[in-house]
Image: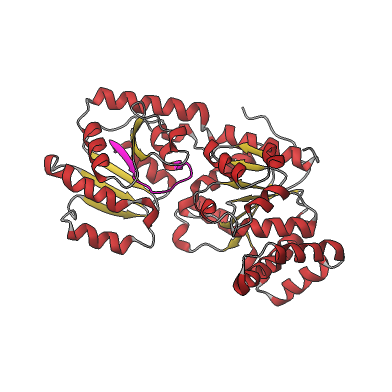
Amino acid sequence: MVEPVAVAGPVAYLTGEYPRATDTFIQREVAALRGHGLKIETCSIRRTGAEHHVGEQQRSEAARTFHVLEAAARPLTSLKAHLAALRDPGRYFRGLRLAWRTSPDGIKGHVYNLIYFAEAVVLARHMRSRGVVHLHNHIAKSSCTVAMLASEVSGIPFSFTMHGPDIFFEPYHWRLDEKIARAAFVACISHFCRSQGMLFSSAVHWPRLHIVHCGVDPALYDAPRGAGAKRLLFVGRLAAVKGVPVLFKALKRVAVDHPDLRLTLVGDGPERAALEAECRAMGLSDVVEFAGYRGQAEVAQALLETDVLVLPSFAEGLPVVLMEALAARVPVIATRIAGVSELVEDGVSGRLVAPGDPLALEQALRALLEAPTEARNAMGTAGRERVVAEFDSVVEAGKLAHLIAASAKGAA
């Protein structure tokens, strides 16, 4: 039984787009926070397209979410928000000054930050109208800039969850130092992530950097798996960062000796058309299936029919899909980057390979596909034990809930 966490009022939960098919871990965190007794008011900068609402739960979440950009685009709503904020001119102009001071270089950077300020003023009014006592933002880029400015204008403390890897490519552009300095706390998804936060912030602020993993509900993946059938699974955005062409190169060589091998790609993205063309050119059309977006339940079902999950990414934070696979007792092959080794133990729950190396990926595929079923099952069992112990979404959300409760009470 989950013990409720006492928070004096509603908590606003903000991200760039919510709910989104590629970010089911955020939806899980929101649900788990509600399970801990917090009243969560979901807010999204942009409205997600209907293609991201792949289940009734996501459609329901979309209907109850406040969309900041849409509200800010309504002249009367925006005017009322600015007039309300100007009742405290000190906070209003400190927020405006903060937006200007933290803008990226150039006219475009300043214009964007002024837009973020306008969005922040609207969000601040919405939060006041709902009695919000704390604002939490997930992902440290533009939505976090809005959260920081809304906090300054409203006086409501804010915090954020930091992932990577993209925020670490441009930490000065996104003023990670300023966000860490002003946040009540920062939830870091891995030790690697926390170390990057330490790198780009003053040591005086390091104590507010906490490890709060993204997680999964292990019970959703605790079902008997089918017999081995040489089925591989990839789940993720079809974008350059995921390294799918490297997988194709390895797959083509392995398929020569394993003609019954099949790979399913779950997900969509900007590289899909190019990847489909490359697949045809390499003669892999009969081996590879492009399945498009799938809901959480469909991914869980696909894992029951999979021998190995493969994630050949060039850059990651700590992929939730690896947690899902391990929770389903599926051994994984992933690249040795960022926080991945904090979850996957090479040779124990899967294999870790160098990013961008098709030969190493080929060898790892052969090793797992040709291993005895008992050996793969042992890897899957070890992986599930790790997830249950350290990546349970309810437990991790409890850590976040306690941090929010402490902030709402004014504790450091």
Percent coordinates x, y for residue 80 in the rendering: 78, 71
Instruction: Quarter of the image for the N terminus: give it.
Output: top right
For residue 399, side relative to residue 343 (left or right)? right
Camera sees residue 65: no
Q: Total marks drawn? A: 0
When asked about the image quadrant of residue 352, the answer is: top left
Instruction: Check the image and report above or below for 30 versus 94.
Output: above
For residue 182, side relative to residue 254 (left or right)? right
Percent coordinates x, y for residue 400 in the rendering: 64, 38
The one of 15 and 40 positioned closer to us in this rendering? 15
Kindly identify the residue that appears in the image at 80 percent across and 54 percent down: 155
Instruction: Quarter of the image for the C terminus: give it.
Output: top right
For residue 360, side relative to residue 151 (left or right)? left
Say whether residue 223 is magenta.
no
The one of 165 and 382 positioned closer to us in this rendering? 165
Kindly identify the residue that appears in the image at 58 percent across and 40 percent down: 194
Percent coordinates x, y for residue 387 in the rendering: 47, 30
Instruction: Check the image and report above or below for 52 versus 35.
Output: below
Query: Magenta segment, principal secondary structure?
Result: loop
Percent coordinates x, y for residue 293 in the rendering: 38, 54
Kindly identify the residue that appears in the image at 75 percent across and 49 percent down: 157
Region of the chain picked out in magenta, as a range: 306-320
